[in-house]
Amino acid sequence: MAKERIVVKIGSSSLTNNKGEIDHEKLADHVHALAALREANHEVILVSSGAVAAGFRTLGYSSKPVTLKGKQAAAAVGQSLLIQAYIEKLHAYDINAALLLLTRSDFSNRLRYRNAFATISELLERGILPIINENDTVSVDELTFGDNDMLSALVSGFVHADRLIILTDINGIYDGNPRSNPSALKFDYLENVTIKLLHAADSTGSKVGTGGMKSKLLAAKTALSLGVPIFVGKGEGKGKLLDVLKGEGDGTYLGSKSLNSINTKKQWIALHSETQGKVYIDQGAEEAILYHGKSLLSAGVFKVVGSFEVGDVAEVIGSSGFLGKGEVKCSSIELKNTLETQKIDIPKATSSFEVIHRDKWVEFKKEEEEML
């Protein structure tokens, strides 16, 4: 079996009991399976939920808190309990672990994004198992990933993983809720995630987790868009993750042979950057960047909205609306001045320059736009 870089995401319901405490039997089973992946010479990155669920009992809550301060306090208590449990169980397999707590701002800030990638790469090179969780202690609603399903998808693309495995308490994706509908049919394989499937998905989640099946489908859609195939399901025993690699996992496989990886720079532009303005382009420019692999030139721009500087990211608007995003090579002032110059009859060919290079441009399909 060829060496792979694998991101494994373990949800709260797969780590804790109904009382919100860490279930050490479940945890030991997961660690055994992770160790088996490493023994098979695969690189492994773990995205683990469970901090809030593990910590709320210690604070005196009878169930998972709903207030922001309650969640953050529970995460502060639970994160230390969770990583301590992982370290103790990994020690039996001579595996050292490192904890990385990330927030949305770590992804949206270009420098921190690069630093996070460098840190994970160094850990893997040194044989350390990175354990990643959202930094719930300091996150606020508008800066969260939503749940660790989405975090795992973003991480899988970010590290150019060969696959993402999401372990949950349901053995795959169904066309309905199997808990309330006994006739719901399971999908063994899906090439993509459709809007219809998302609308039909159950989003209630478990008693201790954040995300339901809809969040896993959204994560799968993101991972697939980044060129990473995904498995959603469950399993028991040392070989459960190796079974997934052999195509024998108890769940649903998503992906196709036509998946294309997206480089880290384009991932940042597409998913994490904050746009600073809008550039409106004519039909000729739209066809050039969408169908002919060309860069966007100033000659194709007829309107600029907002303020941006060199290196910022701007939206590109065509005749049909939003087309994509790109890193600009000029300021909005420079581009506006060029448009004014063109109005006084100076030939465009002599004053045209590159606004967005094709290597720093990301096209958005209509369905992707609807998912934003």
Image (spheres, rainbow, N blue to C red):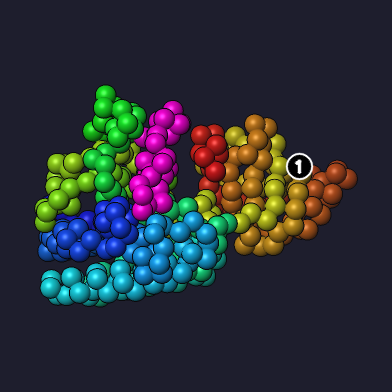
Tell me: 221 left or right of 285: left
Residue tagged by mark 1?
A: 302
**Splitting the image into 4 quarters, where does residue 171 fall?**
top left
Whether residue 209 is in magenta: the answer is yes
Residue at (48% x, 64% y) in the render: 70
| Position above or below: 315 against 290 | below
Q: Position of residue 350 (x, y in %)?
A: 74, 49
Dot 1, how many residues are within 10 Å of its Cα: few (below 14), some (14-19), or many (20+)? some
Label 1 SS: strand
Q: Residue furthest right?
A: 344
Between residues 123 and 19, which one lies in front from this camera angle?
19
Tell me: 104 left or right of 250: right
| Position above or below: 295 against 119 | above
Tell me the kind of residue under disc 1: Phe
Between residues 189 and 209, which one lies in front from this camera angle?
209
Residue at (45% x, 31% y) in the render: 199
Q: Position of residue 306 (x, y in %)?
A: 75, 53
Residue at (76% x, 42% y) in the render: 302
Q: Position of residue 101 (x, y in %)?
A: 41, 69
Residue stretch rendered in magenta on the structure: 192-221
Residue at (55% x, 37% y) in the render: 370
Residue 320 seen anywhere in this rendered image of the structure: yes
